[in-house]
């Protein structure tokens, strides 16, 4: 029964943490809506792409619908050796919307030269680094080629930057739900990551953000030497930027208003989702934050306790009792937390969908965690070990 005591201890710590983190969101719930000002901030929007022909038409349509003055932003698309018609679509968009400054550059790899270090950038880091070096404006906004941008996206960042002297502002990303179960899983999983990220910002422990919606000063990026020591890691252009800014003592903030949130499609297969999670896990191990690693360990232990209690319950009924108690308490508190996050972004929240996802979440989490510890992963037709 020692294990049972350990399971209840893990549950108590987990529930206390989720409560503590969610209460931190209250600061954002109480914020007044952003008051848009006369636009004046100039942005260089950086979009790395590789084989995105399927997604680019929707992205370009959302770009054409941006309400921000065309004279105050430019778009730099970096083509990472696409094997489809991505570059042709960019050229077609350039020709059709000549009033929008959009540039297409090659993503051929460069050498890392920051702080005298040597070594090759991984493809996405190279794309961002090259685009920033070519950018004309003082603020960089990174996003992905498979997102949809809201019409008042740039106004939101402009208003926040005019109100505060912030070096980095992180924005939200929503995975669009469809009728498939896998898309709903990804929707709630991304919502939980945002709740963790936003709650951590509120508790003065900013550790994660999303490169699909991230804004920072160009000069601060250069001064922070973002890629020092991490250029060889395939992913993490977002969290390593945040980590470098924190280490330099730069001002960091998070924006949660619905007008600033970008939308992305869910991955269509379990295999793609698995490879994505393996990639995310590899960058997490390189993040210099005991807080983040501690929270990750706690969440994994909580899922492990649920799965083990299901197995051990066939030998001792007390474990089934723990499983029922833990699942109900966890479901209620997690649901309350995510519903508050959804409210911040003006999203609906379906408790029935969340229940279905909660039933498989422990198994998915453990599978992704355990299989991410070894082997290589695939990303955009390439294989990486980190």
Image: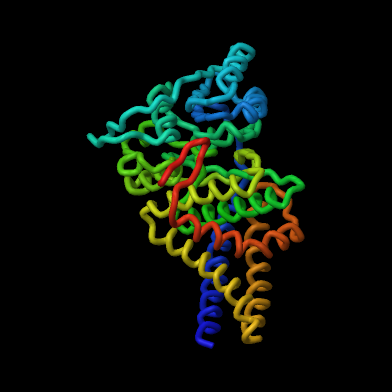
Left or right relative to 125: residue 334: right
Where is residue 255 drawn, in percent x and y? 55, 44
Q: Position of residue 66 (x, y in %)?
A: 63, 26
Which residue is painted at 68% across and 57% down in the image? 339
Residue 132 vertical position relative to residue 320 in the rendered view, above or below = above
- Image x and y of residue 357, in percent: 68, 59
At x 54%, y 47%, the residue is 275
- Left or right of 284 in this view: 360: right
Q: Nearer the viewer, residue 56 or 22?
A: 56
- The location of residue 8, given as percent across then percent down, is 55, 80
Question: How many marks are shown on the rendered structure?
Answer: 0
Please name whichever residue, 9 or 15, is drawn nearer the observer in this view of the structure: 9
Q: Residue at x 68, y 65 (%)?
A: 359
Eyeballing the image, is 159 above or below 186? above
**Residue at figure coordinates x 63%, y 43% from the top left:** 267
Residue situated in front as seen by the camera: 261 or 188:
188
Q: Is residue 250 left or right of residue 327?
A: left
Q: Determine if residue 159 is in view.
A: yes
The quarter in which the N terminus is drawn is bottom right
Picture quadrant of residue 61:
top right
Q: In the image, 342: left or right of 304?
A: right
Visible in this render: residue 42? no
Q: What coloring was used for the rendering?
A: rainbow
User: Residue reaching furthest left?
Assistant: 116
């Amino acid at each position: 029964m020692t294990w049972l005591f350990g399971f209840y201890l893990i549950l108590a710590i987990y529930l206390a943490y989720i409560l503590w983190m969610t209460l931190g969101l209250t600061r954002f719930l109480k914020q007044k809506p952003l008051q848009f000002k006369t636009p004046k901030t100039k942005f260089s929007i950086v979009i790395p792409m590789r084989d995105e022909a399927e997604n680019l038409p929707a992205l370009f349509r959302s770009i054409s619908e941006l309400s921000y003055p065309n004279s105050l932003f430019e778009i730099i698309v970096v083509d990472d050796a696409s094997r489809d018609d991505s570059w042709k679509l960019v050229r077609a968009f350039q020709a059709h919307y000549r009033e929008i400054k959009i540039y297409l550059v090659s993503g051929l790899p460069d050498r890392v030269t920051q702080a005298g270090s040597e070594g090759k950038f991984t493809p996405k880091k190279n794309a961002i680094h090259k685009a920033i070096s070519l950018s004309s404006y003082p603020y960089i906004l990174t996003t992905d080629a498979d997102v949809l941008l809201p019409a008042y996206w740039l106004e939101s960042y402009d208003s926040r930057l005019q109100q505060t002297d912030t070096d980095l502002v992180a924005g939200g990303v929503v995975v669009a739900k469809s009728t498939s179960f896998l898309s709903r899983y990804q929707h709630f999983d991304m919502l939980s990551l945002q709740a963790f990220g936003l709650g951590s910002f509120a508790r003065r422990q900013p550790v994660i953000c999303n490169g699909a919606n991230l804004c920072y000063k160009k000069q601060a990026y250069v001064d922070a030497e973002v890629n020092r020591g991490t250029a060889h890691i395939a992913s993490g252009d977002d969290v390593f930027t945040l980590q470098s800014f924190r280490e330099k003592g730069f001002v960091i903030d998070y924006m949660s208003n619905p007008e600033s949130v970008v939308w992305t499609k869910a991955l269509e297969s379990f295999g793609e989702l698995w490879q994505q999670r393996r990639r995310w896990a590899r960058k997490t191990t390189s993040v210099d934050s005991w807080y983040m690693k501690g929270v990750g360990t706690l969440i994994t232990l909580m899922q492990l306790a649920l799965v083990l209690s299901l197995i051990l319950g066939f030998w001792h009924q007390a474990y089934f009792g723990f499983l029922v108690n833990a699942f109900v308490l966890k479901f209620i508190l997690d649901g309350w937390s995510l519903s508050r996050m959804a409210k911040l972004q003006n999203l609906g929240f379906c408790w029935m969908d969340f229940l279905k996802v909660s039933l498989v979440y422990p198994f998915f989490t453990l599978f992704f965690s355990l299989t991410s510890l070894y082997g290589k992963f695939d990303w955009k037709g390439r294989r990486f070990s980190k």
